[in-house]
Image (cartoon, helix red, strand yellow):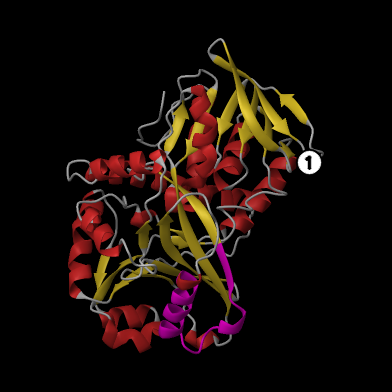
Amino acid sequence: MRVMVLGSGIIGVCTAWWLRQAGHDVVVIDRAAGPALETSRANGGQISVSHSEPWATSQAPLQLMRWLFRDDAPLRFTPRLDMRQWAWGLKFLRECLPGRVPANARAMLRLAEYSRATLQAMRRELGIEYQHTETGIITFYRDQAGFDASQEMAGVLRDFGVDKRVVTPDEIVALEPALAPMRERMVGGDYTPDDETGDAYLFTTELAEKASREGVEFRFGTRLARLLPQGGNIVGAEVIGDDGLYQIVSADAYVAALGSYTPHFMAPLGIACPVYPAKGYSATFDIVDEDAAPSLSLTDNANRTVYTRLGNSLRMAGTAELAGYSRGLNTIRCDNMLRQAREIFPTALDFDNVRFWSGLRPATPSSVPVIGRTKIRNLYLNTGHGALGWTMGAGSGRALADLISGRQPEPEFPFLG
């Protein structure tokens, strides 16, 4: 069967790889000049299975109200004249009901666990190098209220079998000596030793190269204009090549892995896709003092930021803006990230040559991705992974390839169709 994958981020490339391994003829369409150049380009680097926590919790509405008018808020909702934004927000509030949170967390966790196992197997079998580590993630808390609030969700995850260990400030410093200057400003933390890190861009680009050698066709610089429905199926994709000319490309099945842009192409087909962009930021620093730089990946709970060592660089990422499709950098947010990094690692990093980036995370109200077949028989979705695209990418691609191939995917997950 010929399958067209729309999008070449971590989700699209993993889907293409596993479809090809299942014996399908695969073509990947992307408007960018190469793979992983948008949301997968410079994320936080954490493969954080043990942090498979929905944004929508019973505590979230009050937090959002407190942050509503702060430019430096970790999660900022900027109201717009956009019905999709408001509809998404109302669904988000519904997902905050206490009865919905455990089911959402369980679905996320099971997919993330499967994806980590899939990624580990791919690493062993394919020899892909992407600056990965397997040393776990430390989350530290600056105030008792924040720590206490975190334990509700931590308890849910522990009930599902997650190894999420409570650690004291002294134990945190023993695990990560680079946090010694923060000793008196921490009340405690948790350590998830099974979590990993790595560069999603390096992994995706190398996997795309291997997929190409296996026979996957990549058409970069090619923009999707629309999908053409007929008789309950998609009969072609109208695309615009880098020469500016329109053409129709056909396949037997189609996978929309277009991240935050997926709803734009589903709406004309009458398919609801509850995805809205949550713009995230990252800052990449060169390390100038090895002894003062962290070796473990860290999460600063108060500021919702992560720090991950990637070779000779430190990647800092976080914050989220629900404010439409602009990728423009907010200087207040960038300055705030610099201030936070200086506070924690004052001598470790080259602050004069920081590299800022932003990407649009495709967020669903529940934080549970949308994966599976739509009401159009040969059209599938693989999107909505939010901040966990890197964590869930390998497994999401493999699971969808199984669905398309007529096999039951391994993870316990609410797949579409």
Label 1 is placed on what type of residue? Asp
Magenta includes 351? yes
Q: Position of residue 195 (x, y in %)?
A: 41, 60
In the displayed structure image, the side of residue 374 where residue 7 appears, left or right: right
Quick one: 182 or 281, which is closer to the camera?
A: 281
On screen, residue 162 above or below 208: below
Q: Is residue 13 visible?
A: yes
Q: What segment carries the magenta color?
A: 333-357
Residue for badge 1: 242
On screen, residue 212 above or below 388: above
Image quarter in which the C terminus is found: top left
Quick one: 376 or 398, which is closer to the camera?
A: 376
Residue at the outermost top position: 231
Q: Position of residue 199 (x, y in %)?
A: 57, 61
In the displayed structure image, the side of residue 370 where residue 214 appears, left or right: right
Magenta includes 353? yes
Considering the whole magenta stretch, tell me its main secondary structure.
helix
Residue 18, quarter of the rendered image? top right
In the displayed structure image, the side of residue 402 where residue 110 appears, left or right: left
Q: Position of residue 387 (x, y in %)?
A: 43, 53
Residue at the outermost right position: 243
Residue in the image at 53% along x and 41% along y: 261
On screen, residue 207 above or below 169: above
How many neighbours does mark 1 have within 10 angstroms: few (below 14), some (14-19), or many (20 or more)? some
Quick one: 47 or 275, which is closer to the camera?
A: 275
Q: Is residue 350 visible?
A: no
